[in-house]
Image (cartoon, coloured by chain):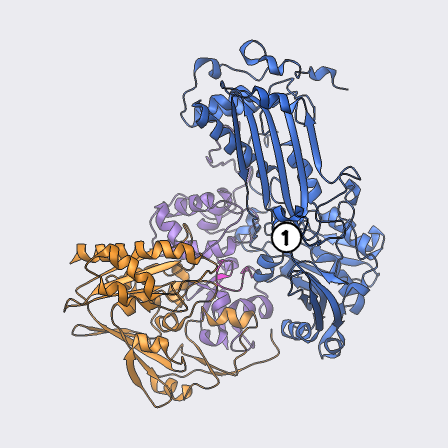
Chain colours: A orange, B blue, C purple
Amino acid sequence: MTASSPEVLLPESREEAVQAFGDGSGVTVVAGGTIVLPELSYGRLRPGRALLLTRSGLAGIARNGSTTTIGAMTPVSELADLPAPLGPAAARVADVEIRAQATVGGNLCAVADEAPRGELQAALLALGATVRSAGSGGERDEPLEAFLDGQRDRLLLEVSFDEPAGGAFEQLRRAHTHAYATLSVAASRATDGTVRIAATGVGPYGRRLASAEARADDPTAAGEAALGDVTLTDDALASAWYRRRTLPVLVQRVLTRLEEVA
Amino acid sequence: MKAVGARLPRYDGVAHVTGRTVYVDDVRVPGTLWVKALRSPSHHAAITRLDTSAAERMKGVQAIVTHADVPTLVYGHLSALGIPGDEPLLARDEVRYKGQPIAVVAAEDEETAQAAVDAIVLELEERPTLFDVRQAFDPDAPTIHEWGNWYPHFEGEMDRRQIRKGDIDRAFEQADLILQGVYRPAAIEHAPIETQVCLVVPEPSGRLTIYSCTQALYFSMGVVAAHLEVLLNRLKFVGGTVGGGFGGKVDTATETICSLLALKCGRPVKWRFTREEEFLVSSTRAPWHIELKDAVSKDGWLLGRRTLTLHDAGAYARFSPYGLTKHSFHHTGAYTIPNLHFDGYVVFTNRVPTTAMRGFGVTSVSFAVETQMSRIAHELDLDPYELRLKNANRIGDTSPNGVAYTDPSTVATIQAIAEATGHELTAEYRTMTGDHREGDWLPEHLVGQIRDPEEQH
Amino acid sequence: MNLTVNGLAREVESAPLTPLLTVLREELGVLSPKAGCLQGGCGACTVLVDGEPRRSCLLPLAALDGSDVTTAEGLGTAAALSPLQQSFHRHYAAQCGFCTSGMLLAAHAYVERDGSDEREAIQEALAGHVCRCTGYTKIIDAVQAVARGEIEGGQPWTLETGEGIDVEIPGSPA
């Protein structure tokens, strides 16, 4: 029971959602709620206007030729059967209840706090995904990498990627836990042979490991090179020291696996 | 007597599975106020200013308590066991751990209570901190407790728990193997699924009804009565099902403060810790630093043990001296060691005060002792079960503090474990009993130490 | 806003962003879902929403208009336990009981979608639920027994009904 009550907007279509979002100023977007609700409960977030996307019609997975487009409100659980790297990344997010409520959009917009979040970022970066968003200046498409590096003042509508020739995903988490993963590394080989590698758990949000990509032919060298792409810090799950030792191993494993499935 | 040996249903089982068990937060009394605390943001500081006036004026705030509202501010929860009090219920001149409660607010709703806490003016002057028990003994360590950096009141006047038995120097002269180890079990948060919670209802009769999650109802009742300077018959404690405690719900963490709030405003008051408070501020199992040095004969007899234990009590003593005392009785584990030199210290640090958790004081030293035994077996190339059986307590063996064992089950237990794990023991170990030592099981160095339990006092 | 809770239509007035857990406990007096962490990390708040297990501490009321909510009280009564409730009771799957409500609902949903009797699958279904008392084994045993069709609901097991469960405690004389 709280004294204050923000204005709550419940758009019933994509168009209404985009309009309600406007340029995003003063708007708190609530997708699945798995990240925002704890912030409300602990009094760390006091929204003036909350935009609930529950009825916005932004969920769904569509295939157009070799391109897959996933709506922002698609539950993470619906991706679990997709091929690597996205399927395994989604299947391992938290537990069955959280996965069914958490959304792809929320996961892509997540930043780390005490622990890394947003494990789908690694997979979708590795897939070279493009994000469509709305906000100031209207709707636009941009690479996921640019969206993540941007101002975070846009409404994510959908994410698209081309089907890869192969993919791999490796994750490091504390044994028997179903919360956040210490490290996630994803890799894909596009149909033209390009290899992309990305990770979460290596900074505030997912990162491409460009130096590792440059050495993709040699998994061990790629593993070592990956360390140059990240600035590791301590957090609640692991120390920078531990991640420095395990990130190269995961990079090595995904590249080896990528070779196996080629 | 059909109940004996039968599988009885839990008397609370049906309530549990139908969601009807009542926990403290499920007790609903109209007009109940929410509680939030102002907690120290600093690990160690002097309080130079505390001003609750703006908070008191806020709409919806019904009561705020500080140290000034507490009749007996410092009360040792285990003073009956000779452990004097050192911890103020609410901080007065200083804070010694991050999270220490300074002022507590009761308001109409959670948001108002938190806003009131945020409106309290608190000014601090930082002081140097101590976090590592090993540094407490450095000559240039900051002093963080008025008693000094370690507890000085064992048996009234000693600064350590001390056990001396036999001739430790001779044991080490005779040793074929000297094995040392440093064991540092970490703090453990109890993390019950139900956080700390209590509801205090002031009754028209002038009594307080206190719904508490305490594991120790009468104990907490005594603590509240002592702080409030009231007779026990002013208090009606209602316990019930506790949503997990494991030792973490004996500190009477909320009941006294809620009682003061309820008395001040005449309204029911409920304080439920958030999960963050539970993790950051509620007491934990203590971290320990245990150094063992064992003198062992080549055929696996434990001749002597030197032990240094540093127990991290956090900022205040609470139950730590009691825990260390238990630890000292158990520092030989289930084994007979005739020559002992034990020193144990309760050391203060600027951390959340530590408390009991399953096996208080003993689990830490069991970890150290058993690891040490396994390492000894490895060094001497002896079977780890047989090493333990050889040294296992028997009738007539004496404990570290000289009490003769009358019915130790160590031998039978180790034999049962060997069987359960499919570990083959040689015949003499398989047929060994826990009876008085004799023959091969009575080496010369133990002869002087065997007692007849019948002769005890 | 309208919710159906354990079969009863309720009109709800809490603010739109109020978590369902708070609506249930504070406005509607439905107390079985528990506030274990308010962060979605422990599972003690889980309820069924339109038959699906969800963390009620993470669901804003505004997203739930017209939803059908089931809590532990809705699974069965003291005189007519559901098979799962009976199984939890007989297998000692609850000690302090604080996690039990959430566990039951997650397990109920699992059994309803014909979950297998394999322990790993059961563990996956209950993975979001923390128990500090039981060590989980007896909870898994209880769900497994139901998945195998071994348990009948109804009157709770008592000493008088003479049934015991073969809960093996090696070395125990019982």
Q: Residue at x 40, y 60 (%)?
A: A94
The furthest residue to the bottom: A137
Q: Residue B93's spot in the image, x, y percent?
A: 77, 63
Residue furthest toward the top?
A: B439
- The residue at the point 18 percent across, 68 percent down is A194
Q: Is residue B65 above or below residue B367?
A: below
Q: Which of A201 and C66 lies nearest the eye of the viewer?
A: A201
Q: Quadrant of the N terminus of chain B?
A: top right
Spot occupied by residue A204 in the image (x, y as percentages of width and height): 41, 69
C96 in relation to C42, above or below: above
Q: Residue at x 26, y 63 (%)?
A: A212
Judge whether residue A203 can be spotted in this image. yes
Q: Residue A12, image x and y in percent?
A: 38, 83
Mark 1 — on which chain does it sit?
B
Splitting the image into 4 quarters, where does residue B169 fall? top right
| B136 magenta-colored | no
Which of the pair B193/B136 is nearer the observer? B136
Residue found 72% across the figure and 79% down from its top: B58
Q: Nearer the viewer, residue A224 or A174?
A: A224
Q: Please give left or right for residue B109 compared with residue A58 in the image.
A: right
In the rendered image of this protein, does residue A138 appear above or below residue A43? below
The reply to whether residue A82 is visible in this rendering is no
C9 w.r.t. A92: above or below: below
Q: Which residue is mark 1?
A: B283
Q: Main secondary structure of the magenta part?
A: loop
Q: In the picture, residue B291 is in which quadrant?
A: top right
- Number of numbered discs on residues: 1
The secondary element bearing badge 1 is classed as loop
Residue interval drawn in magenta:
C33-46
Amino acid at the residue labelled 1 = Ser
